[in-house]
Image: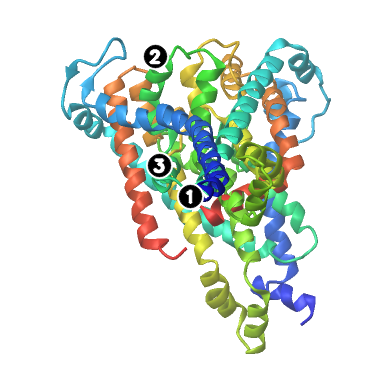
Amino acid sequence: MTHELTRLPWHKAAWTRFTRTGVVLLLFLPPALLLFTVFVALPMGEAAWYSLYSWNGFGTPTEFVGLQNYIDSIENPVFTTALFNNGLIIAVSLLLQLLLALGLAVLLAEKVPGTTTFRLIFFLPYVLADIAAGLIWKFVYDGDFGLVAKIWEFFGASAPYVLIEPDWAMYAILVVMVWKYFGFYMILFIAGLQQIDKSLFEAARIDGATRWQIFRKITLPLLGPTVRLSVFFAILGSFQTFDLIMPLTKGGPFDASQTMVSYLYNYGVTRMEIGFGSAVGVILFLICVTFAFGYKRVFMKND
Amino acid sequence: MTKAATQKLSSGGLPLVVIYAVLFLVAGMVLIPLVATALGGFKSVGELRVNPFGLPAQWDWTNYIGIFTGPTYWRLMLNSAIVALLTVFLTVVFSAMAAFVFVHIKFFGSAFLFNYLVLGLMFPVATAILPLFIKIRDLGLLDTYWGVVLPQVAFGLAMSVLLFRNYFKQLPGELFEAALMDGCGYFRFFWFIALPLSRPILATVSVIIFVQSWNSYLLPLMVLNKNDMYPWPLGIMEYQGMYSTDWHLVLAFITLTILPAIILFFAAQRHLVAGLTAGSVKG
């Protein structure tokens, strides 16, 4: 009996703690889980479901068409253009943008006067909305008013309207993309460079390593995790390109500058082809997820 | 080793002249479009045509004053501010609460639920935009701020839960044990100890989520059809559509709409950089 009595308070404390834990669990977790489920997970699942129907969004989807939406979306020539453009965006991100960012990060990692100002300037376009950046460059590219027009006039030629030339529009967009995003990657690289132990450079220097050797053998390998992560961001981000397209070309002229998302928007959303748009969404989802898991498995195992 | 020698090391020993030449060239390419936009707002259409990038011959304030005194600009700013602030508040509260549970309470399925939430980092909003639109419509949230806010919160959760969890993890565990010993419940511990200690990560997450929401375009485009509810990216696109050839007006409008972002950038750039690098190093 006395034994029982002495144990009671402990019991009680454990019980209160247990119920408290339960209450916290039931109050703290559900808001996040509920919102995520309703607005992220469910729509993703529903995209797979709707993609099998021909549906304009009213009532419930009843007209089952199997994989027809997938066939239609892939067979549309715009799909190929969009995929090619997304590939182009990835290529430019990796080859031009990341290299530019890396080069500038190396230049700005040292303490020459003015580095802070330059870092701020280079990073500035990143905080602007894609919409604003796109409109600003629409002005720059304008054949009557823009900078591009003035440069051509200087050479005595009449300026092309780059954004309405099917052969030029996508490249004009790529320039804006590099302009807007290189600063972001530069900041990532600078953060990565700052984590490298400075004594390594010193030791290499004493051993008589050339500057290029130091960059090649020390800086670059130690920057590995940052580089791999930047590549990951750059590729995943490239698949989402949309906001920049809309103010500049809306995907035109003649669909020349469509990306996967603008294709989804222009052919699925504006025409209220829910099934078709969902199919494009599912394809994009599969591309992103396959890429994300594959990349993490192959390149980021140890990071 | 002297400072000068260290400097030369990482840059490959380029002469300072070359370094500065490159830096000024790139800075020029970044700034010229921005400065031209701000200056363009002070010009007339005629002057813009002959002199798009120089200083205005006559500083014409009427474009700016007209926008500042008209109703459109302030309505757009207000709409964007309401949506962004609600989004930031709910994202921070919900993700801090969830992260707190993941760190401090051991329960069956914890790892699974965490991975489930973080999966949201893997794919863009756009992939499920049509079913999301149907969902928002069926919930009766079309043409409401909540129709934009709630999905934005849902898509922001993945990153902020991850950042909060990493931060809470590195707070000393004894703190929690000691507080519980002293009879401090989970709620009081969360509110009076964990959150105040997390000010740096609170600021970081808030700034990132704010910028994302402030700049977002696709979701409001789907959800909002009344232009008196438009946030500024929708409003500016509409404005550009209406005054497409009056570049002086459009440029003044762009300048004024990006002004808050630029002010925020200079005020909070440390948090912004911290957030981006934290997200990248630990992501």
Residue at position x 60%, y 33% from top?
Answer: B93
Q: Which residue is mark 3?
A: B116
Distance, label 3 to label 1, CA atoms, is 20 Å
Q: Is residue B121 above or below residue B23?
A: above
Q: How busy is the neighbourhood of tag 3: few (under 14 within 10 Å), some, or many (20 plus)?
A: some
Please identify, in this view, whether the residue under mark 1 or under mark 2 is nearer the observer: 2
Please identify, in this view, whether the residue under mark 3 or under mark 2 is nearer the observer: 3
Q: Is residue B48 visible?
A: yes
* Residue B52 drawn at (x, y percent): 70, 32
Q: Is residue B104 left or right of residue B48?
A: left
Residue at position x 41%, y 40% from top?
Answer: B123
Chain label for disc 3: B
As rendered, which of A52 and A100 lies closer to the eye?
A52
As rendered, which of B137 and B93 lies closer to the eye?
B93
Chain label for disc 2: B
- Most extreme residue toward the front is A1
* Residue B264 drawn at (x, y percent): 73, 36
Q: Is residue A178 visible?
A: no
Q: Which residue is mark 1?
A: A233
Residue at position x 67%, y 79% from top?
Answer: A199
Q: Amino acid at mark 3?
A: Tyr
What label sits on residue A92 in the rendered view? Answer: none
Q: Secondary structure at mark 3?
A: helix
Q: Which residue is mark 2?
A: B138
Q: Amino acid at mark 2?
A: Asp
As rendered, which of B57 and A137 lies closer to the eye?
A137
* Residue B215 drawn at (x, y percent): 59, 31
Distance, label 3 to label 2, CA atoms, is 25 Å
